[in-house]
Image (tube, rainbow, N blue to C red):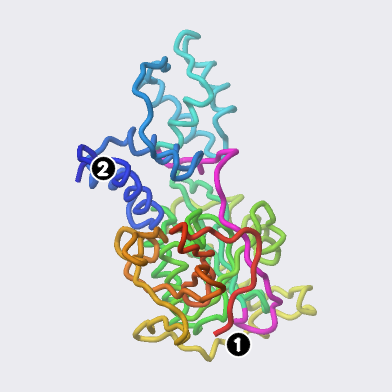
Amino acid sequence: MSWNNTNTKREREAFIGDFQREEFGVVELALRYGISRKTAYKWLGRFEEEGWAGLEERSRAARNHPNALSGKIEKRVLELKARWPRWGAPKLLVKLRERVPAEEWPSESGVSRILQRHGLVRPQGRRRARAQGTPLQEYLGSNAIWCADFKGWFSTGDGTICTPLTITDGFSRYILRCQGLSEGTGGLIVHPIFETVMREYGMPEAIRADNGTPFACVGLGGLTRLSEWWLRLGIRLERSRPGCPQDNGRHERIHRTLKAETAQSPQANMAAQQPAFDAFRREYNEERPHEGIDGQTPSAIYVPSAREFPERVPKVEYAPHWQSRQVRESGQIKWQGKNVHVTVALAGERIGLEPVEDGIWMAHFATHPLGIFDERRGTIEPLRGRRKERRS
C-alpha cells in the first residue's frame, strides 16, 4: 500500500487509525503503507498537534531544516542513555557536549528525537490532545473496580528496559498481577495478560485506568481495541482525569511500595526480575498489614468475582427504539447515503444511536457514550467533560 494514489489524505487518515488501534508499531505500519519511518513520524506528529486537520497537504515551498544528525552522534546518545537510563534529553546533552567537538553538538530536540525513535522516552507535547476523564464510583466491594497502570520503566542490571504492568482490586488492595514487560506496552501485549487474570479471578464490574495507551486514546470515546474488548465483556470503563493521579490514588500508592521493594535495586535481568515481582506480590497480599483496611492483609478481604470469563464474547445489543449501524474497516458508518466518521477502534462492531431530538442522536458503544451525532452536519462531536453513562 502506498500514498502515491489519488487520495493521500484518506491514506493518512487510515494510517493514523491503524496506529491508534495499537496492533502494529510505527516501523511495521510504515512498511505496510509503503512510506519511510521519517514520513510516518511526521504525520503522527502533525496529528498529535493539529488533529485531523493536520493531515491536509501543505505547500511544498522549500524550508530551512537542520542537518540530520550523524550516525556517530546517534550512537553516542544511545550509549549515554544506556549509562544513565533515567536521564532525559537535557542532561544527556550536557554529557554529550563533554565528549564531542562543539561543531558537532546537536540541539536538545535532536537528542529527544533520537530517544523517541528508539522508544526510550514517552513523547510529550504541550498541545497534544488527551482523552477525557469519566465518572468515578466508590470501591463498594471486591471486583467492583479493578485498577490498572504501568509503573515507570527502569533498567535491569543488563540494561534491559522493564515496564511493570500492575492490576489490583481497588477495594481490598489485592494485587492481581504484576508483570514485567520488556517488549512494549501495546494492546496486543497486555490483552492476554488481562484475559489470564480474568480467567483466574473472574471479571470486575469496572476497570479504572489513566488516559494513556493502550487503555485510552484521543479518538472518539477514547476507545482502543483493549477498552473496546472490555466493553464487549460488560466491563464499565473508568478513566482518571488528565493530570490527576489522585483519581487512582490507591493504585499509585502501591506503585511507590513496588518501586522501593523491587526497582531501586533491580535484578540482573528480566529472568530474575519477574520472580522478584512475584515475591513482592505474595508478601504484599498475604503478609503485609495495610492501614487502609484496618491492619488486615489484602488476601484476608479479597474474594474472587462470581462473573466468570465467557468462552465467547457476547454481542452488544441496543434498545429496540434505537438505530444501530456497523462500523466499517475505515472507521465510518453509513447514514442516509453518506459516510460518517466514528473511530477505527470499533471497526467491525455495531454502535447504537439513541434519539435525543429531531436530527440529534447520542452515539454509544455498549454502555459507553461516544458523542453527539448531528445528522444535518454528518458528524459525531465528542463529549466534553464528564457525563454519566447509560445503564443497561
Which residue is drawn at the image coordinates 43% and 47% (left, top)? 160
For the residues labelled 2 and 1, the Cα–Cα distance comes to 55 Å
Q: Give whichever of 110, 219 is nearer the camera.
A: 219
Which residue is drawn at the image coordinates 45% and 31% (left, top)? 113
Question: Up-down: is 58 above or below 99?
Answer: below
The location of residue 219, given as percent across then percent down, is 47, 56
Question: Up-down: is 213 above or below 359?
Answer: above
Callout 1, which amino acid? Val
Which residue is drawn at the image coordinates 49% and 31% (left, top)? 112
Q: Which residue is mark 2?
A: 7
Q: Secondary structure at mark 1?
A: loop
Callout 2, which amino acid? Asn
Confirm whether the magenta stretch covers residue 134: yes
- Residue stretch rendered in magenta on the structure: 118-144
Confirm whether the magenta stretch covers residue 347: no
Question: Up-down: is 126 above or below 174?
Answer: above
Q: Which residue is mark 1?
A: 303
Q: Residue furthest bottom?
A: 306
Dot 1: few (<14), some (14–19), or many (≥20) neighbours within 10 Å? some
Q: Earlier in the sequence, mark 2 or mark 1?
A: 2
Q: Nearer the viewer, mark 2 or mark 1?
A: 2
Q: Could you say which disc has been placed on residue 391 in the image?
A: none
The location of residue 273, given as percent across then percent down, is 48, 58
The location of residue 30, given as percent across then percent down, is 28, 42
Image quadrant where residue 47 sits: top left
